[in-house]
Image (spheres, coloured by chain):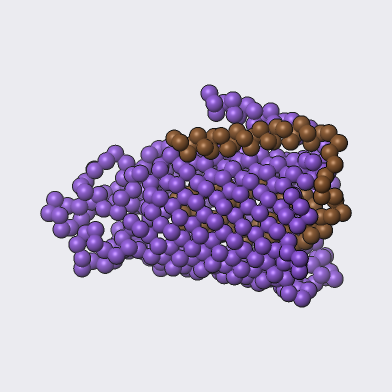
Chain colours: A purple, B brown
Amino acid sequence: MRTRIFLTLLLAVITFEAITVNAAVLPEDRTDVLYHRYEGDNITIEGPSVLVRKQVGKSFSVTGNWYADLITSASIDVVTTASPYEEERNQYSLGVDYLRGSTMMSVGLTKSTESDFDAETWSLAITQNLFGDLTTVTLAYSLGDDVVGMSTDETFARDVARQVYGIGISQILTRNLIVNLNFEGITDEGYLNNPYRSVRYLNEDGASYSYQGEVYPNTRTSGAAALSARYYLPYRAAVHGEYRYFSDTWGIQADSWQVGYVHPWRDNLTFNVGYRHYQQTKATFYQDLFPRVDFQNFLARDKELATFTSRLIRTGVAWDFGEEGFGIFSKARLSFFWDKMLIDYEDFRDLRVTDVAPGEEPMFQLDADVIQVLFSVWY
Amino acid sequence: MKTGNIFYRLARTMLGLVCVSALVGCSNFEPWVKPYERDRLADPIMFLDHDPVSTSYMHHVLESREGSRGAMGAVGGGCGCN
């Protein structure tokens, strides 16, 4: 009942916001070509992402995106319970923004395909500028339908339905400071576990262990809220920070904070550095080693549901050129980002170490590098 | 359950702020930061999402490795001054 009242109010506000009039702008016309590469825990994921955005008439902007992942995996999950594999994922997105006064309405469709997973997501968002454009309010909703398959069983197909509700407020506080408050609620219903993953349990002899398939609940509801700020320094540089809190019905609680610094150098170079700290508690049905088979109705040993702390260090540089214009383009930019990710797990053990008793293996650690090379042109 | 209530209250408060701002936004509001004083906020170094493709990719990387999801910047707006 509470949810229904909330949604009715949300719809009323969306309608009211849509008929108020002020002034806003459509996103810039640009094309981005990204090469991305993730490498860590014997997994390599790389590929391109291409985004094209173009204004159509005075009120519409159309955007299209193709994103691909080429995956080669021999991760700890794979080497302990399965075989190394190669996989390809392609994702296509199409979106339209419509500007009317100070109201921007956006609709989008994203489709993702891989050999054992298909996803389709529809999204709707309304953005409204208020108070002489000091305040920007965004209301967003998306609806996703996924089909989970298995490469070893062509007949296996399970559905997942996902809904995302979002509210965002962006506020100019001074001529140097802008802050944002975002909230997102997500509900999932359907087959939520990975069909390939297993949990381990102690055998009756107490000196060895076996595996059985994971069993997750069929529903999950989560909420996340983030407060961020960006400040312009006196010598043309910027600092930014964010705090985010997350909680869900599986018992996971997480929070993160991050800080960053942007420093332009001369006319064409911009340097970025940043640090992000993240920590989470485990899901209530997660255990590294269950005492016996079928120990409880829900079972998980997915390291993303474990207790861990993650640190991310970012460095980046961007080079702006062609600002006098060339051909049909008004300017261009070449960017390079390197993110170093370190994760320390507190209850996920490294099963590649076999010369110790079950439950005595060392804790697993993840050390990953994320590289991005981005070329952008504006027109 | 307790944290669920916190999020529900937060969402309700934010929705209330949106309702109030929608009503007040129709009046002749005098902004305390004038449009001609927003040159710094319009500088690209102040953009919240200067490279959407890169931002979207990093969110995908983080959500693949972590148990949490949402509020990673997809909802928020900008300063409306670019």
- Quadrant of the image containing the C terminus of chain A: bottom right
User: Which quadrant of the view contains residue A36?
Assistant: bottom right
Residue A49 seen anywhere in this rendered image of the structure: no
Please state if A233 lies on the left or on the right of A326 as rendered: left
Please state if B13 lies on the left or on the right of A89 as rendered: right
A30, A323: nearer the viewer: A323
The x, y position of residue A166, in whole percent, is 61, 41
Residue A206 seen anywhere in this rendered image of the structure: yes
The x, y position of residue A167, in whole percent, is 63, 40
- Residue at image point 60% right, 29% down: A7
Q: Is residue A45 above or below residue A154?
A: below
Q: Is residue A139 above or below residue B56?
A: above
- Residue at image point 44% right, 35% down: B1
* Residue extending farthest bottom: A266
Please state if A200 lies on the left or on the right of A166 as rendered: left
Q: Is residue A174 above or below residue A7?
A: below
A191, A132: nearer the viewer: A132
A328, A99: nearer the viewer: A99
Q: How many marks?
A: 0
- Residue at image point 54% right, 56% down: A257
A341, A92: nearer the viewer: A341
- Residue at image point 70% right, 63% down: A238
The x, y position of residue A35, in whole percent, is 60, 67
